[in-house]
Image: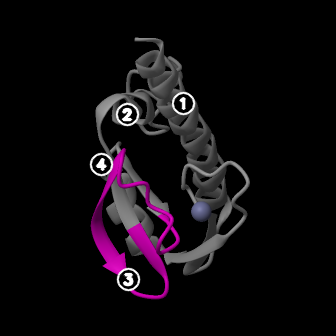
Amino acid sequence: MEADEDEQERARQAALNQALRRDVNERRLESSDGAEIDFVCECSDPSCEEVVSLTLGECEFIRRVPTRLVVRPGHADPETERVVMEEPGRFQVVEKFGLGGDVVEHLDPRGVNRRGESS
Ligand SMILES: [Zn+2]
């Protein structure tokens, strides 16, 4: 069915977008010297411009698993993401599954097999 392919393509595009946002956040984290880092919301809505303030410890918790993303409360997509942790009023940590999960895992900025560059 073509509808299924459209659905898959949509999920893939959303995940690619989210991986890009994660890259932006990863750079913010690298250049941060404070205890709090402002992350852009990593939800699947490309027009979302909300900001999530995280502590370094929270960032590490999220990045420990390559399929985890951080979003504003209510921004999780239940079709492709499950909420694994919530700080009410601040953020939700989600794990993507299925195709989207594969995409964000493959593009993990901390993945050892990606880009061929080591730091
Ligand atoms: Zn959002």
Query: Callout 3: 10 Å neighbours few (<14), some, many (20+)?
Result: few
Give percent across and percent down for residue 84. 26, 64
Q: Is residue 96 magenta?
A: no
- The amino acid type found where label 3 is placed reads Glu
Marks 2 and 4, Cα distance to the nearest angstrom? 9 Å
Front disc: 4 or 3: 3
Pointer 1 local density, CA inside 10 Å: few below 14, some 14–19, many at least 20: few
Query: Which residue corresponds to mark 2?
Result: 105
Q: Which residue is mark 3?
A: 87
Which-is-in-front pick, marks 1 and 2? 1
Q: Earlier in the sequence, mark 2 or mark 4?
A: 4
Q: Return the residue nearer the eye: 28 or 73.
A: 73
Asked if disc 2 and disc 4 are in contact, CB closer than 8 Å, the reply is no
* Crowdedness near tag 2: few (<14), some (14–19) or many (≥20) residues, C-alpha within 10 Å: many
Identify the secondary structure beneath mark 4.
Answer: loop
Quarter that holds the N terminus: top left
Name the residue located 58 percent from the left edge and 30 percent from the top edge. Answer: 13
The residue that mark 4 highlights is: 65
